Each structure stands twice: as C-alpha cells, then as structure tokens.
Image (cartoon, rainbow, N blue to C red):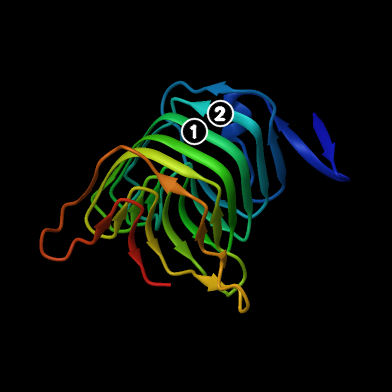
C-alpha cells in the first residue's frame, strides 16, 4: 500500500511487522499509532525519508548487545536521510556500544525535525543522548536536529546529554548569526542525565559535548 504526498510516493506502515521490515532506503509514512510488543531490532542504516505524520510508536524496547555495531537506537545510523513528525513513547533503549539515542544512535548528515522521545536510554559506551547519541556532520551536508525534544533518563560513560550526547555541528547565518543547522529549537525536559566516568565524564541537560 502506498501514499503520494507532493508527488512523492511513500510506503505505508500500519503494523509492527511493517516497521521492523523497513529497508535501508526508500520513503515511508506511519499510517497510525503503533503499540509494540517484545524486543525491537534496531533499523541498521537508513538513508530514506520516514514521516510519522504526527503518529507515535509506543513501548519501543531495545536491548542491544551487538558488539559489532557502532551505534544503537530505533535507527542505528541515519545517513543523509530524514525523520519527521514522529514520537516515541514509553521507550527503553539499552546498549553496550557508543553512539546511542532513543530515536537515532548516530546522525550522519541527516535531518531530524518535529520528533520526540520519552523513556530511558542507557549504555556502557560514550555519546549517549535521549534523542540522538552523536550528531555528526560527516560530509558537510546537513546533520540537523530541529523542533524536537526528549523527556528521558539517560546514562552513559561520557558525553551524555538529555537530548544529544555529542554534537559536532553548528552553522550560523552569516548575516543574522542565527543557527541554520546543528541542534536548533529543541530541548530536553525533566529526566536525569548521568555520566558514569567520574574522571572525564562530560554530561549536560541538553548536550553532553558540544564541539561544533
């Protein structure tokens, strides 16, 4: 089943099986709210468009001990893709790797807008955030998070943030000096943030390490 928005075709996701079966590319829309059951396997790498159409995914549960992975989250790595208009509620994300977030583990030149995550994110690794673990401008293309928030309890080794664990992206308008990409118009609310590395464990309510 498909849907066309502004002359772009999208695959409709209506159930958990469809969500779990998302390919690494392509365009998808969430047709309705979803209540997940059991443990969800993270979507490995995604470079397409995912539009939640304002719907939510409830009870996301990830217990990721894949030692060969480099990130963890609903989507491990967003690679020049887009996620919009999506909420994750009552989520639990647990991992042993670095670059861990409730929505996206590692954002490489992707666009994340009008999203939220509510739940917990824990890892024994670094760069751990409520929404995104590592927001990385890998090829000077995009890597933008805007109009999004997290309400989460977050724990990691170091570079731990309520919204983003580590951000190395910031670009300002040359005239107004307003941010045009990076982490914009976004916030974290309530929740706890803890870095377990007591010697050098950077942690922040919004961003753990902002090195952009």
Q: Is residue 154 left or right of residue 5?
A: left
Q: Quadrant of the C terminus?
A: bottom left
Q: Quadrant of residue 200?
A: bottom left
Q: Decide which of tag 1 and tag 2 comes sooner along the chain.
A: 2
Q: Nearer the viewer, residue 212 or 139?
A: 212
Tell me the SS state at disc 2. Answer: strand
Q: Quadrant of the N terminus?
A: top right
- The Cα–Cα distance between marks 1 and 2, rounded to whole angstroms, is 6 Å
Establish if 200 lies above or below 150.
below
Query: How many numbered markers are drawn?
Result: 2
Query: What is the residue that sits farthest to the right in this orientation?
Result: 7
Mark 2 surroundings: few (<14), some (14-19) or many (≥20) residues within 10 A: many
Q: Residue 87 location, x and y as percent? A: 53, 34
Q: Residue 190 location, x and y as percent? A: 32, 37
Q: Residue 130 location, x and y as percent? A: 38, 45
Q: Is residue 212 left or right of residue 126?
A: right
* Residue holding disc 2: 56
Camera sees residue 138: no
* Residue holding disc 1: 88
Say which residue appears at 70% left-offset and 40% top-offset. 28
Mark 1 surroundings: few (<14), some (14-19) or many (≥20) residues within 10 A: many
Establish if 209 lies above or below 25.
below
Q: Is residue 152 left or right of residue 111?
A: left
Say which residue appears at 36% left-offset and 50% top-offset. 129
Query: What is the residue that sits farthest to the left in this orientation?
Result: 199
Tell me the SS state at disc 1. Answer: strand
Disc 1 to disc 2: CB gap under 8 Å: yes
Establish if 136 lies above or below 12.
below
Say which residue appears at 39% left-offset and 58% top-offset. 70
Q: Residue 170 location, x and y as percent? A: 50, 70
């Amino acid at each position: 089943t498909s849907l066309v928005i502004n002359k772009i075709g999208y695959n409709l996701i209506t159930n958990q099986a469809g969500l779990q079966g998302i390919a690494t590319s392509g365009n998808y829309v969430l047709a309705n709210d979803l209540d997940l059951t059991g443990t969800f396997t993270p979507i490995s790498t995604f470079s397409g468009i995912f539009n939640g159409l304002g719907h939510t995914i409830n009870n996301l549960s990830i217990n990721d001990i894949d030692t060969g992975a480099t990130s963890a989250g609903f989507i491990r790595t967003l690679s020049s893709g887009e996620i919009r208009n999506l909420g994750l509620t009552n989520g639990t994300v647990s991992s042993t790797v670095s670059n861990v977030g409730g929505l996206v583990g590692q954002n490489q030149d992707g666009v994340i807008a009008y999203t939220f995550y509510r739940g917990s994110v824990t890892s024994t690794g670094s760069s751990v955030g409520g929404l995104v673990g590592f927001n990385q401008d890998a090829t000077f293309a995009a890597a933008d998070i805007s109009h999004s928030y997290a309400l989460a309890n977050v724990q990691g080794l170091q570079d731990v943030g309520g919204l983003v664990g580590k951000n190395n992206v910031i670009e300002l308008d040359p005239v107004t000096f307003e941010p045009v990409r990076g982490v914009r118009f976004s916030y974290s609310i309530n929740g706890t943030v803890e870095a377990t590395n007591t010697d050098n464990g950077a942690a922040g309510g919004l961003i753990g390490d902002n090195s952009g």
